[in-house]
Amino acid sequence: MSRIGVLLGKELADLRQNRAIFVPALITGGVSVLLPFFVAIIVPALAGERLAESGDLQIAVEMYKAHPALRHLGPEAAIQAWIFQQFLILLVLTPVAGAMSIAAYSVVGEKQARTLEPLLSTPLTTFELLAAKVLGAFLPALALTLGCFVIYVAGVAIVAEPGAFLALLTPASLAVMFLLGPLAALTALQLAVCVSSRVQDARSAQQIGALVVLPIAGLLVLQLTGSFELTARASALLAVGLLAVNAALMRLGVALFDRESILIRWK
Amino acid sequence: MLTASHLTRRFGDRVAVDDLSFEVAPGEIFALLGPNGAGKTTTLRIAAGLIAPSAGSVRIGTEALSPAAGPRLRIRIGLLTETPGLWDRLSVRQNLRIYARLHGLTDPEEAVDRALDLFALADRAADPAGQLSKGLRQRVALARTLLHRPDVVLLDEPTAGLDPESARDVRELILRLKSEQRAIVLSTHNLDEVERVADRVAVLRSRLVAVDTPQALRARLFGARVRIDLAHPAEACVSALGAAGFADVRVAGATLSVGVTDHVAATPAIVRALVGAGADIEAVAAERQPLEDVYLKLLEDDGARHGGHGARPQ
C-alpha cells in the first residue's frame, strides 16, 4: 500500500472516531436538500398558488422546450424542474463547507496534537502528506455529496410533478454534480490544507479556504438571475480550469510546506 | 554508525548549535547533556533529517543525510520525540500499524505483534491511545520508534515525567537496544540516568563543552581518589601513607580520602601501607564524584572561559 493510502486510511479511521465533525456538514446538507422543496413544493402549496400561474417563471417553460427529454413536461413540472436544477449548485457547496473544517484542521491539528514530528520523521514526503490530507477531507465530502444527491433526486421523483426529476439527470446537471462540484471541492480543500500548513490555528485556514465558496455562490446567483447558464460546455471549460488550478495548488502546497518552520516556530 | 561533523544551526541571529562534532558507534549509548536551550533537541532533529544544518553534515553509516536522501535514510533512523505524539482516538495497534506501513515494512502486522509483545503492550493493543497512562504512552512511542528496527535511535528525554518504575522500564529498554548493537543518542536532563546507561557524555551549550566517558570526565575534573573507612580515627595513618608515596591525603574523622592517578593500581599499595601501620580497615572504595558535580563544574568552567553563566541544575 502506498504511503498516501496508509495516511489516508489513518485520516478516515480518525474521522470515524470523531463523527461529531460531520454534524455541521450534515446540517447544511440537510438544509440544502430541503430548501428547494420549500421553494418549489411547500410554499406554493401553502399559498394555494401553482408556480405555473406566476409569469416570472415562464423562462423555465421556454428553456425546456428545446430539450428532448424534458420538452414533454407540463408548465408546473417544468418550473419545478428548473428550480430543482438551479438549486443543485447549492448542494455542491454544502459538503465543501462541511469538509472545510477537516481540511483546515489537517496539518495544524497534527502539530497541535504533537503528532506531526513523529510523522515527519518517517520516509513520508511532503507531497504524500499533503495528498493524504486533502483526500482525507475530500472523500468524505464526495460521499456526502453523493448521498445528498441521491436523496435529492429521490425526493424530487417522489414529491414533485412527474418527470421533473429528469432535469437533474441531464448532462449539465450531472457535470455540475460529479465533475465541477468535486473539482471545486478539491480546490477549496487543497487551499485549506495549504493554509493549514502555514498558519498556527485551524480557524484561519478555515476562513481563507472558505473564500473558494464565494465564486461558486456567485455562479448560483448568476444562474438564478438568468445572467449565466451552466451548460455542459461551460461546465467542461470550468472543469479544465479547475483541474489546472488543482495541479497548481498541489505544487504550491508542496513548495509552501516548510517542515522547519512548522517544527521549530509553531508552539 | 552516526557521524556529525561540524554541525552548526542558526535561527536568525541565534546560534542553536555551534560547530558540533561527534560519532556514535553501533552498541554505544551517547548522552547529550546541557541546560535548556543548549541545542540538544535541535541536534537530534538535524540527526533525524527533520531540519537541515546551516553548516556541517550528518552521515548515517557512509551516506550523507541530505534533503534528497532524507526519506530513504529515515528508514534507518528512529526518533523518539519529546512528547509521545500518538493519535489519541486510534488504538495502540492502529498507531503502530500506520507507522509500520509508512516505513514500508514487508509484514507490518508481524512487526506490530512483535513490538506489542516486546513492550508488554499486547493486552492494551485495542485501547485508544488517549486512554493510556503517561508511562504506557511513552512505551507505545518507544515501540513506534523501534518498529522498523532502525540502526540509529535518537531519544529526546525518554523518561521525562515518568514514575520511577516506568523510567526504569525505559532504561532497561535502552540497554536492550545497546545490546542489539544500535547506535543510541540520548538527550536528557536526568544525570542519574546518564550515569546508569551512557557510555559517553557530551555536555553542550550550543557548542561542545566536553565529551568523554563519565569516568574520564570525573577524573579530568576531580582526579581519582580512593576512600578508606577505618574503625578508629584516621589522623595517625597519614604519615604511613606519606611514606608510601601518597601525598594527597584528606582526613575526616575515621575516613581517609587519597588522591591517586589510577585507583585500581594504587589501592593495593594503600591497603598494604595502612595494614603495615596497624590500621583496622572497614571498607575501601573508589571515590565517585556525583555526575551532577562534574556537569556543573564543566558548565561553570565553560561560562568562565566564554563569559557566560554557570549551569543551573535542571
Image (cartoon, coloured by chain):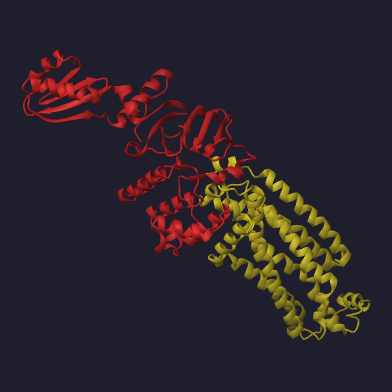
Chain colours: A yellow, B red
Q: Is residue A231 visible?
A: no
Residue placed at 63% from the left, 42% from the top? A258
The x and y percentages for residue B219 are 31, 24
Residue placed at 86% from the left, 59% from the top? A237
Q: What quarter of the picture does the C terminus of chain B occupy?
A: top left
Left or right relative to A191: residue A49: right
Residue B58 position by quadrant: top right
Q: Is residue A223 visible?
A: yes
Left or right relative to B58: residue A38: right
Residue B272 position by quadrant: top left
The x and y percentages for residue B184 are 44, 40
Q: B268 or B205: which is nearer to us?
A: B268
Residue placed at 59% from the left, 51% from the top? A107
Residue B300 position by quadrant: top left
The x and y percentages for residue B259 are 22, 20
Q: B185 or A16: which is nearer to us?
A: B185
* Figure check: B134 above or below B46: below
* Figure check: B79 above or below A141: above
The x and y percentages for residue A66 are 94, 76
* Figure check: A45 above or below B99: below
Number of residue marks: 0
